[in-house]
Image: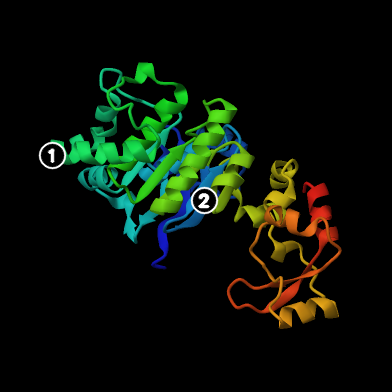
């Protein structure tokens, strides 16, 4: 196994029905979901899904309602038992874990944050945050210290003695996030955590989580039905339809090269300049002036810089700038105002 891979899913199937294990063994895998249901009476929720998640990245699983995204992610944690296939974490097969080992995994290695906060109404904010540590058997003083630490991290300092009913929806979700972080998990799973929040609060929570992730570098699996949220939060995105993964890639790869019409429809309203980098839109042929700037190491632009960050620099000048590789420093091409303006006008 690649040491950078934290989670590897291989050929995951999930059927719902009275005899799923027998049916999957005899199943003609070429049948459509509708044909499987007609022939076997079983519903295919996840169909032969494989992907890997790198250590420390945010991996987004997105799709419309009924696409299988929540079922798939629940198979990863075995809240739902996959019908077939394997899930490995650090090269340990989760699908073969005993109930005791699975309990230890959930207590010590993994935390989940759901759309509905699931806070205990009779416990204070601080007591809610420390619940996972309490279950683990952590001593009270240590529990309180850790709970206060993550309370500050999620921006709830001063609210430790309040009860959930006294908090807004956004604040309650911050408590849910703090509770998940308190146990110091290696893996965080988010099931549409912000979809019930007002748009402004939702944006604030997205920004908060991005800041926390930048600091902690945990492996995060994030479910959403919102493509704009997916491209904002994800290092990689898996787009699901009818239980299958249509495409996996970085936000930039997906927006630049959607593999089918279903993915293209998601990308339709995304301003390209917010996602694409200089290296994706640059002109590969360079004029002499650009080559001269490169030789002097003047005004060079890294290939991984987003177009959005270059607008102020390029929009009021006719000058072309050399685009260089972020890793090697080699000249790759050039970028100018016309390229930036074209990317700003285009959606997908």
How far across and down, in percent of the image, does residue 5 sit? 42, 62
Q: Quadrant of residue 138?
A: top left
Q: Are the residues tagged 2 and 1 within 8 Å (C-beta)?
A: no
Q: Quadrant of the N terminus?
A: bottom left
The first of marks 2 and 1 along the sequence is: 2
How far across and down, in percent of the image, does residue 280 sit? 72, 63
Closer to the camera in the image, 102 or 214: 214
Left-right relation of 134 to 50: left
* Figure check: 41 above or below 323: above
How far across and down, in percent of the image, does residue 331 sit? 71, 78
How far across and down, in percent of the image, does residue 150 sit? 32, 40
Q: Residue 193 carries which label?
A: none
- The answer to whether residue 109 of the structure is visible from this angle is yes
Element class at badge 1: loop
Left-right relation of 191 to 343: left
* Figure check: 286 above or below 126: below
Dot 2: within a 10 Å radius of its alpha carbon, few (fewer than 14), some, or many (20 or more) residues? some
Left-right relation of 68 to 216: right
Q: How many marks?
A: 2
- The answer to whether residue 82 of the structure is visible from this angle is no
Measured Cα–Cα span from mark 2 to mark 1? 41 Å
* Figure check: 343 above or below 143: below
| Picture residue at 83% right of the left edge, 53% below the top | 341
* Figure check: 298 above or below 339: below
Q: Name the residue under label 1.
A: 139
Q: Mark 2 points at which residue?
A: 49
| Picture residue at 39% right of the left edge, 45% below the top | 188
Comparing marks 2 and 1, which lies closer to the viewer? 1
Element class at badge 2: strand
| Picture residue at 72% right of the left edge, 83% below the top | 295
């Amino acid at each position: 196994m690649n040491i950078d891979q934290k989670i590897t899913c291989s050929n995951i199937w999930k059927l719902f029905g009275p005899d799923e294990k027998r049916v999957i063994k005899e199943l003609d895998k070429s049948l459509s979901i509708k044909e499987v249901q007609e022939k076997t009476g079983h519903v295919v929720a996840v169909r032969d899904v494989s992907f890997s998640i790198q250590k420390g990245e945010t991996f987004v699983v997105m799709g419309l309602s009924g696409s299988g995204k929540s079922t798939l992610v629940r198979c990863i944690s075995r809240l739902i038992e996959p019908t077939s296939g394997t899930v490995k974490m650090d090269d340990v097969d989760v699908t073969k874990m005993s109930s005791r080992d699975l309990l230890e995994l959930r207590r010590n290695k993994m935390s989940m944050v759901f759309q509905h906060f699931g806070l205990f109404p009779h416990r204070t904010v601080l007591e809610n945050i420390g619940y996972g540590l309490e279950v683990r058997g952590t001593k009270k003083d240590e529990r309180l210290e850790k709970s206060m630490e993550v309370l500050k991290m999620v921006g709830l300092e001063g609210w430790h003695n309040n009860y959930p009913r006294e908090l807004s929806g956004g604040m309650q979700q911050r408590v849910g996030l703090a509770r998940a972080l308190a146990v110091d998990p290696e893996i965080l799973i988010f099931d549409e955590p912000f979809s019930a929040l007002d748009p402004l609060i939702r944006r604030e929570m997205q920004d908060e989580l991005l800041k926390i992730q930048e600091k902690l570098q945990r492996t995060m699996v994030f479910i959403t039905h919102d493509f704009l949220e997916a491209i904002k939060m994800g290092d990689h995105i898996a787009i699901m339809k009818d239980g299958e993964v249509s495409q996996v890639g970085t936000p930039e790869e997906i927006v630049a090269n959607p593999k089918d019409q279903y993915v293209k429809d998601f990308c339709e309203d995304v301003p390209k300049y917010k996602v694409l980098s200089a290296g994706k839109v640059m002109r590969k042929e360079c004029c002499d002036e650009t080559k001269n700037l490169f030789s002097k190491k003047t005004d060079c632009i890294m290939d991984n810089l987003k177009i959005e960050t270059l607008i102020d620099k390029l929009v009021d000048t006719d000058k072309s700038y050399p685009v260089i590789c972020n890793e090697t420093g080699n000249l790759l091409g050039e970028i100018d105002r016309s390229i930036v303006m074209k990317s700003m006008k285009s959606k997908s």
